[in-house]
Amino acid sequence: MSATYYADFAPGSGRRAPRAALHSDAPCIDLSGTWRFHLSGSADAPADFAAPGFDDSGWLVLPVPSHWPLYGHGSPWYTNVAYPFPLDPPRPPEDNPTGDHRRTFDLPPGWSGDVVLRFDGVESCAKVWLNGTELGHFTGSRLPTEFEVGHVLRPGRNVLAVRVHQWSGGSYLEDQDQWWLPGIFRGVTLLRRPPGALDDVFVRADYDHATGAGTLRVDASTPAVVSVPELGIAGLATGSAVTVPVEPWSAESPRLYAATVATDGETVSLRVGFRTVSIVDGVLLVNGEPLALRGVNRHEFHPDFGRAVPYETMRADVLLMKQHNVNAVRTSHYPPHPAFLDLCDEAGLWVVGECDLETHGFLFAGWRDNPSDDPRWREAYLDRMRRTVERDKNHPSVVLWSLGNESHTGANLAATAAWTRERDPSRPVHYEGDHDCEYVDVRSEMYASHKETAAISEQTTIPFVQCEYAHAMGNGPGGLAEYVALFDRHPRCAGGFVWEWIDHGLRHPELEFAYGGDFDEPLHDGNFVIDGLLFPDRTPSPGLLDVKKAYEPVRFTFGPDGLTVTAVRGDLSGLRFEWTVEPGEAGVFEVPATGGTVPLPAFRADGEVWLTVRAVLAADTAWAHAGHEVAWAQHRLNAPAPMPAPVPSSRLLRTDGGYALGPAAFDRTGRLTTLSGRPVAGPRLQLWRPPTDNDRIGRLHETWLAMGLHRLTERFDDVEAGEELVVRTRAAAAATDRAVRVAYRWVPLERAVALHVDLDPEGAWPEPIAKLAIAFTLPRTLDHVRWFGLGPGESYPDTGLAARAGRFHATVDELQTPYIRPQENGRRAGVRWATLTDAAGDGVKITGAEPFGLTVRRWSDAALAAATHRNQLVAGEHIELSVDVGHHGIGTASCGPGTLPNYELFLNKTAFTFVLEPVKLG
Ligand code: IPT
């Protein structure tokens, strides 16, 4: 077998030892910018381009950092578990896109002596030459690499040449569920190393919660002097410790102290956060307090730049997380750009720092030859973890080290854990794949059901973390509130991380956002890469709003003595409490920082009225402005007046076409044709919904298709015209012998009609159905929707935590949630009444005897189900109105448990009532 560098077990050659990412005053040169670029399909072309005199004027140009497939050279490729090449470690495939990169730079005067060239991220393997001298090579795409270059630098003009192979031995260790995107995608920097340089610094800043003292000790590769002016620490020698009173660092209160570590030649600036992670009686603690991880998994992603994420985007992620009550991030499944961790220190997020490692695709080979247990890969495993820990060890935000993801188990992982613990005993070690907890400090699971979560939390003797749960693919995740309630209940359960932060949809000229298969990849996993809480452009999805509600740090409970306010994490200082009663009444109330019960004013109200209480930021913070809502709750002050018993107020008339009943007209078979002269067709029984990703991948949708729910036909059997109009139908699907007997009973009211629907299943219906609704077709002009119910966003039985009771309005277009792969969406729940009107305010009103679900679209369910991308949804000639009395829950069966039993929907004999009337809004 060839031991060519790109087909090797070894992680690299010629590299410097890994060290901390440091902010230094030593001069540096940013080599980002426009480089020359040439792509070839073979890894073995002669490397003549490395010669300083090579003429690259005919080459293309490419920005660095970047992934070349996002600039039209080759194309992105998405796989989840499967490797996109045959398994024959460490050999990559023959077809190995290889990007040669070249740039020149001028060395400023005075740059003699030691100089280091650093790469912060190159996928997947690079060989580097400076002025024609080969420096070495490296793998480890999301890890830093440094070379000594002082001896090859020349005064004046220098030529840097980098050959990047898409595939390498390293690719076997990088089988994360994401796009394969080669390139120099993070910065390249030239760092001057002055005499007396401080290469490495290791800050240990512990906090003793019993005494309130912080102990600081800094170790450095060169003896140096430590100062923390704010703490009066000056001239502290590296290697010695000092103990002083401090304020501790936490995600809620991220107190940082500016520090410097200096030699004669170099000064490094740090921000020190004092905190101690410990495990006591199986509970994971920081500063003596149980750590409640209410987290998300974050991949680095930008829809235009892939993993070459701009700084402002990293910042946006941190702010969005904080604004949505997320307090923890798992850096799935590799170290992020180093600046991201600075932002986490600053804003306050607990971080699980994960190594760049995944070998998931060996699953398909029964884990045969899995690198995790193959001694030939041992050095590569250790190398990756060393580069992770050494780079990020000084961040107070990092509280756990994670060995990697989905790499099964084996001796190399155990060795990595042992090294990590020895190098940094201050942080527990996490790795989900060590199910027997032989070499980890915390037990970890992914996608455990609620039941399993409860059982593990009760049985475990060490802290338990759900490193992934609540798969946020498409519409969902359902069942989030129940998970968080379990986390809150069990002290040994330290919480979990939603999968995942953002949809990895790549911007596409026709499709808007592309996913697997959109680049004609021969093997791919479709839209499984679209499973985030943010849409690719970072617009929050309804799932993120639910996360915000589920992760609220404040709890409100309404009781006979008033409102009890409890801090779930941290305290209540920094918050202001407000109440509102629609319409128009509002006030504030005082709550002690530690929480308490406050009496509420007496409110007088007629009809259904809700009190809303809110906790908002009292002052600006680093992550949101004063007034930003952190938590809220509602309490109904008055029950709704019951719907008046229908009093027939007009008589049924026979007409040429059929029947007339108040404002409603019907054809001879009893189908509604107009309301107040406006065409309205219906009702139609609906038992199906366009499948969500969870329905489809969890295969419940197969059941619905087998039942024929998507092709229900309704036979009009009988019309009985007396005081009322009773229309009997039988709804059934071709080739099946079960059916629903439906009786639509129309009763005239004053300027309105009531519709009583009786359903009687015929035959056995043991499987869940998707939805139970009746639908109407309306003119396309009725596109303004107002409703009283839950809003403003969508809700399904086990989602919509963020929706609150109130009066809302939206256009039909605004009611749609633009999931990247179209699917069931946009339902508003708990609706008492809704109007659909045209621009002049004319239209129809529908009122439920009981709160109902409202869905309004410009396309049919069939069209929604058939669309694979947003651009395929085209407004039709009508508006489709569906009013439901039940939906099956959403669950997370695309990866994880399905709908909890109490959110399942079955067909039973049932009855419900709606009132339809024409309206004219003022
Ligand atoms: C789990 C992976 O860790 C994660 O990277 C992602 O692929 C997720 O699934 C699904 O989106 S692994 C799975 C087998 C539970």
Image: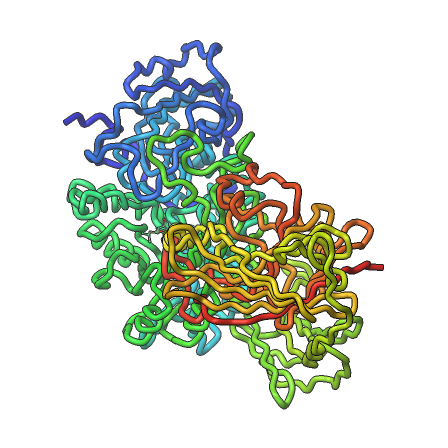
Toward the viewer: 25 or 273? 273
Q: Work out which residue is located at the far right of the displayed protein and give it.
A: 922
Q: Quadrant of the C terminus?
A: bottom right
Residue 268 visible here: yes
In this picture, residue 173 sits left or right of residue 651: left
Image height check: is 525 above or below 324? above
**Image coloring type:** rainbow
Image height check: is 138 above or below 902? above
Q: For the image shown, how many numbered marks are present on the structure?
A: 0
For image coordinates 53% across by 27% down, the residue present is 33
Q: Quadrant of residue 46?
A: top left
In this picture, residue 609 sits left or right of residue 479: right
Q: Quadrant of the N terminus?
A: top left
- Residue 161 lies, in percent from the top left, at 40, 21
Toward the viewer: 404 or 342? 404
Q: Work out which residue is located at the far bottom of the displayed protein and give it.
A: 561
- Residue 171 lies, in percent from the top left, at 30, 36
Q: Quadrant of residue 229?
A: bottom right
Toward the viewer: 904 or 802? 904
For image coordinates 52% across by 55% down, the residue present is 715
For image coordinates 47% across by 10% down, the residue present is 58
- Residue 919 lies, in percent from the top left, at 78, 60
Toward the viewer: 225 or 700? 700
Image height check: is 221 above or below 638? above
- Residue 784 lies, in percent from the top left, at 73, 52
In this picture, residue 696 sits left or right of residue 910: left
Residue 252 visible here: no
In this picture, residue 669 sits left or right of residue 436: right
